[in-house]
Amino acid sequence: MPKCFPINRLLQLKISSCVIFLLCLVAVIQFFASYGRYHYEHIPREHLTTNIFFRTNPKLEVNKEKPNCNYDGILQSTSSIDTRNVPRKFGDFTTNGLVNGSYTPENCNPLLSVAILVTYRDRQNQLDTFIPYMHNFLRKQGIHYTIYVIEQQDEKPWNKGLLYNIGAKQAIVDKFPCLILHDIDLLPLDSGNLYSCLHEPRHMSASIDKFRFVLTYDYLVGGALAIRSDQYIAVNGFSNKFEGWGGEDDDFAGRLKAKNLKVIRYPRELSRYTMLVHPQEKKNRDRSRILSENQMSHNKDGLSTAEYAVKSVHRNTLFTLIGVKT
């Protein structure tokens, strides 16, 4: 005859199981809480327009017979593209209105001029997706813009910060008051994501599908960032010391903080991006050391000290290509 299992032993097992379950639940909650923020500090929709830095390129011709472009409809839009429906090929893409990678609205006078700086090397498939996608997205917004592709044409380690400095110098010479620093592997999903600068630097890509649409940390500025040209000059641009992947964006965040520039964001539903799949760049093993050393030397390393050789500046229909050796 089998022995009866003690009731107190059964109770102990149940209690132990409950404790283990609760510990696992707490661990899961802590993981997601520490990994990122689904809800982050942002400008309310009703205050977006008052925060926009309305400024156009002085070279832009104004037609007094046309009305000014209005952006309220864009900012209040709730339409979005599902990541599964993002096109990868553009056989029906048209170049209507594009000249030298620039676009100016036909039916109204834009109140915004934006230079979109894209750093690039050996990612032709992503370039073939990014360029037509962005033109289709931006031509609906009523803004004047130019896309600059800054290509590193050498075999040296990848240097995104230096490439941004090179692109910024050209865009500033071209009189653009607003710069958008944009990774080539990110595509915006929300039509209400107006590509413009605000009075303070604006981190645009706060919600990326690869990271479950959460902001991975509060001082993140990488991916897509809009900043006024005068502010870019004031912080002396990016450091030129970061070779390989990682570190330059966090260093740039430190530069903004040192100049008392607060990074602000749009609501989550206007900040969603999808990331194109790509091989990871070789990581910069010295990024922590350089970050530490750079804290007190922003004025000695950056836009004002960038050393490079421009091989060519080619303005074609889809973008302005700046080919450089670092």
Image: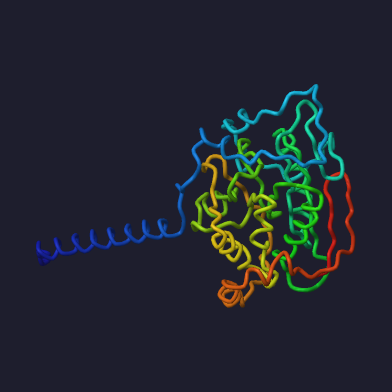
Depth check: give the residue in front, 137 or 275. Answer: 137
Q: Position of residue 250 (x, y in %)?
A: 58, 64
Q: How many marks?
A: 0
Depth check: give the residue in front, 226 or 300. Answer: 300
Q: Position of residue 167 (x, y in %)?
A: 77, 57
Q: Is residue 283 above or below residue 28?
A: below
Depth check: give the residue in front, 293 or 24. Answer: 293
Q: Which quadrant of the structure image shows residue 159?
A: bottom right
Q: Residue furthest top?
A: 65
Quadrant of the frame with the N terminus: bottom left
Quadrant of the frame with the C terminus: bottom right
Q: Which quadrant of the structure image shows residue 121?
A: bottom right
Q: Position of residue 103 (x, y in %)?
A: 80, 38
How is the protein colored in the picture? rainbow
Residue drawn at 79 percent across, 62 percent down: 122
Q: Which quadrant of the structure image shows residue 140?
A: top right
Residue drawn at 73 percent across, 61 percent down: 165
* Left or right: 32 in relation to 250: left
* Left or right: 37 in relation to 83: left
Residue drawn at 37 percent across, 58 percent down: 28
Residue drawn at 69 percent across, 67 percent down: 302
* Left or right: 109 in relation to 282: right
Q: Position of residue 175 (x, y in %)?
A: 78, 48
Depth check: give the residue in front, 210 or 320. Answer: 320
